[in-house]
Amino acid sequence: MTARRKSSNYQASMPFAREPFKTIYVVQRLVTTILMVPIWALYYSVMPRRFRPRPSWSLKQIIAVNFMRRIYKVAELAGVTWSTRDPEASCDNKTLKETRFEWVDPLPEDLRTGIVVDSQVPFKRVGTFVWPKQKPPEIPDTAPSGDPDASDVVLVDQADIEANASREPIIGIFLHGGGYCHMSAHEQCGPSRIPRRLMQHKAFTEIHAVEYRLLQHAPFPAAVQDAAAVYAHIVRRHQRKPPASTKSPKSASSQTSDDTDNTKEIDDNQHFLSIDYDASATKNRKEVNEIRVRVNHAARFKGCKIFLIGDSAGGNLVLALSRWIRDEGILPPPDGLLLLSPSCDPAHAFPESPSSYVPRPHASTDYLVDTPEPRALLQRTFLGHNPLETMHSPYVSPASMRVLRAFYGDAFAASVEDLTIERLDTAEIERLRTMASAPATPVAEHPPELGAPLERSPTSLARPIIASPRGMSLFTDFPRTCIVLGDAERLEREVMKLVGAMERDGVEVRTVWVEDGVHDVLQMAWWDERVRDRVCASIEEWLRDVCES
Ligand SMILES: *[C@@H]1O[C@H](CO)[C@@H](O)[C@H](O)[C@H]1NC(C)=O
Ligand SMILES: *[C@@H]1O[C@H](CO)[C@@H](O)[C@H](O)[C@H]1NC(C)=O
């Protein structure tokens, strides 16, 4: 209920959000937009190509972009949300053609640590639309009864696991875009074009599209909670039963005492990923090393490959989920991140001073609109009861200038400030790579950890919550990442900052540049299919590389 009240609050403060203005505005806008279509078609077919927003664009592409831009403006100014679903509603399998609907339990209690914990945001069960519709046959438990006399049990086991790795299911977790206020995970909703396409060539065994809570339903960290619940569910469902041989004292004695403890937990099986581990109480005492050992151990028994996939705001959520997995150090890390035009600087709507506001680039070639006030209102609703400076948390705006400066200093921040694909020559790319190998500068002022509940005291923007636990850099230990980005899209600059920062922290990033591409081309209804096929081929090539290494 409170969420509803809040949502009507943010809508009430938007220019055309009150009736009757809303209906008049929306209808007027729709009608004129439809009337514009033949005019655009005529204009651009008589004018030479160089008058097009991008000469390579077809008429269909121009019309799609212009049309969407006008419709998006309606959404921003009138507070209209579309294609959303109630996240608490079930979905009848009979109504679904390509997916099955499955509930996932709320995040298990033993995993409720770090930023997902918030007394005002309850943990909930999460709906998922799972591709394909037919459940694949149960994954056999990989528990060879193991020869207890084998002299090198651990090695044999390891080799076995590696030999089997190619047969491991490849699971995608898809977090849809829509600015945290539009769209849903339903198979008929626009962003589902992405999992549909990725399933076409059988690159994935399954893709779980997550019906996470949008800002109308609950504020941050609700969406992260929901994504985390699905991640934990998949890890545990595919978790390998440890081979009986691990119990042998020989293998146990050959390991560190910490690992012996883990071995004991493995005997109990089900929940060895977390048993006996009270993160909040022991985190400060735990050495980085012990966390590594635990995570590596969990990773060895992860019976599948997991890729986190997100477009636009979904990409933002993928980055937040990966950060939580890394910061807490309980669950094994995902194998890769696939970010499609990720939104990584929502703090952009909150300039340090009004005069320092720099509009996002490519206003004339993209359909995303960027009107600061409605954006800021949406972001405030997204934060809900959280202090405003949560906006500058790496969990929310990992590529904001403030975060980049705090982690890497002014020089680096300046070097990526105006990085764009167009300006990037080979030397520049070389420079980015060199920076990637340079040791990360320690964080200037880091409170010891972000794992602890966020500080709730009323603070000013002068003390943003910018830190990583255990002295890690912004993207230390992040998995391999593939980023798809158009050079005609409004998020170009912030995504390039993200690429620069990730590479600097040693993350292997593959950037797929879509020439003359707008925001999130894979989910657009009308875009050049050949371009999309090429993008998908690049993604699948990256997937193969990651799975084979
Ligand atoms: C839909 O089908 C799957 C199995 O294919 C099942 O696990 C799930 O519970 C079903 N969902 C509903 C809402 O009945
Ligand atoms: C490897 O795969 C085979 C056949 O699927 C299975 O019997 C065996 O237990 C697996 N071994 C490991 C260690 O996963």
Image: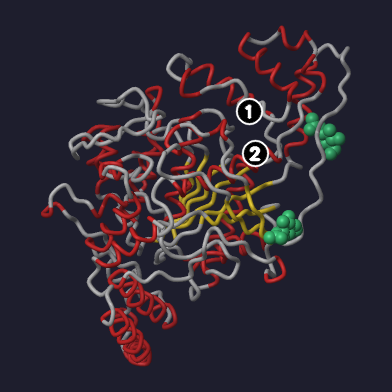
Give yes or no for contact between labels 1 and 2 (Cβ–Cβ under 8 Å): yes
The residue lying at 72 percent from left, 22 percent from top is: 266
Residue named by callout 1: 273
In x, y percent, where is residue 388? 26, 45
Q: Which residue is drawn at 79% across and 43% down?
A: 139
Q: Is mark 2 on a helix, strand or loop?
A: helix
The quadrant of the rendering that contains the C terminus is top right
Q: As displayed, is residue 81 above or below residue 294? A: below
Q: Which of 60 and 445 is in front in this view?
A: 445
Give x and y (percent) for residue 437. Answer: 40, 30
In this rendering, does residue 85 appear at all? Answer: yes
Q: Which amino acid does label 2 sit on?
A: Val
Q: Can residue 132 be seen in this view?
A: no
Q: In this view, does 327 lie above or below 379?
A: above
User: As shown in the figure, which amino acid type bears the numbered disc 1?
Assistant: Leu
Q: Mark 2 points at which residue?
A: 235
Mark 1 secondary-structure assignment: loop
Image quarter for ligand 1 equals bottom right
Q: Nearer the viewer, residue 320 or 90?
A: 90
